[in-house]
């Protein structure tokens, strides 16, 4: 099992509506691509002062490395990033953990 963790630092163009639209589009990938077993999204609720401007994150869980490896270059994923993520994000961090 692979947990794909992505953190977002939004820019001035990121309205709450645009952020929610992006999150919904990402959630929709679970129903469109094989191997995604879980998706959770939201703003940081950490009480620690180490967020460095990263305010939101998602965790997408894949049942195998092969499904994660197919997701990253998949045309649906690439199109979603171009349409919804790039216009409102200044930076992102991706970390994958194997369970």
Image (spheres, grey):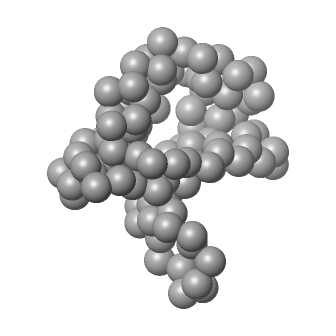
Quick check: 15 above or below 80?
below
Q: Nearer the viewer, residue 86 or 62?
A: 86
Residue drawn at the location 77% of the way across and 28% of the way down: 65
Quick check: 63 above or below 15?
above
Visible residue check, residue 31: no
Q: Nearer the viewer, residue 54 or 38?
A: 54
Q: In which quarter of the view is residue 4 placed?
A: top right
Q: Quadrant of the N terminus?
A: top right
Quick check: 23 above or below 34?
below
Residue drawn at the location 54% of the way across and 87% of the way down: 47
- On screen, residue 52 versus residue 20, left or right, reads right
Q: In which quarter of the view is residue 25 placed?
A: top left
- On screen, residue 54 versus residue 32, left or right, reads right
Residue 93, given in percent of the width and then of the height, sits at: 62, 49
Residue drawn at the location 39% of the way across and 38% of the way down: 85
How many numbered marks have been drawn onto this rendered protein structure?
0
- On screen, residue 98 versus residue 71, left or right, reads right
Visible residue check, residue 50: yes
Residue drawn at the location 73% of the way across and 44% of the way down: 96
Residue 60, given in percent of the width and then of the height, sits at: 57, 43
In this view, which residue lies farthest toward the right? Answer: 98
Residue 8, given in percent of the width and then of the height, sits at: 48, 53
Residue 87, given in percent of the width and then of the height, sits at: 33, 37
- On screen, residue 65 versus residue 54, left or right, reads right
């Amino acid at each position: 099992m692979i947990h794909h963790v992505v953190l977002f630092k939004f820019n001035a163009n990121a309205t709450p509506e645009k952020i929610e639209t992006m999150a919904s589009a990402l959630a929709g990938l679970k129903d469109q691509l094989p191997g995604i077993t879980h998706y959770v999204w939201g703003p940081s609720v950490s009480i620690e002062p180490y967020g460095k401007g990263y305010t939101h994150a998602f965790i997408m869980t894949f049942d195998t490395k092969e499904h994660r490896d197919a997701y990253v270059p998949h045309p649906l994923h690439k199109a979603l990033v171009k349409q919804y993520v790039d216009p409102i994000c200044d930076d992102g961090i991706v970390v994958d953990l194997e369970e």
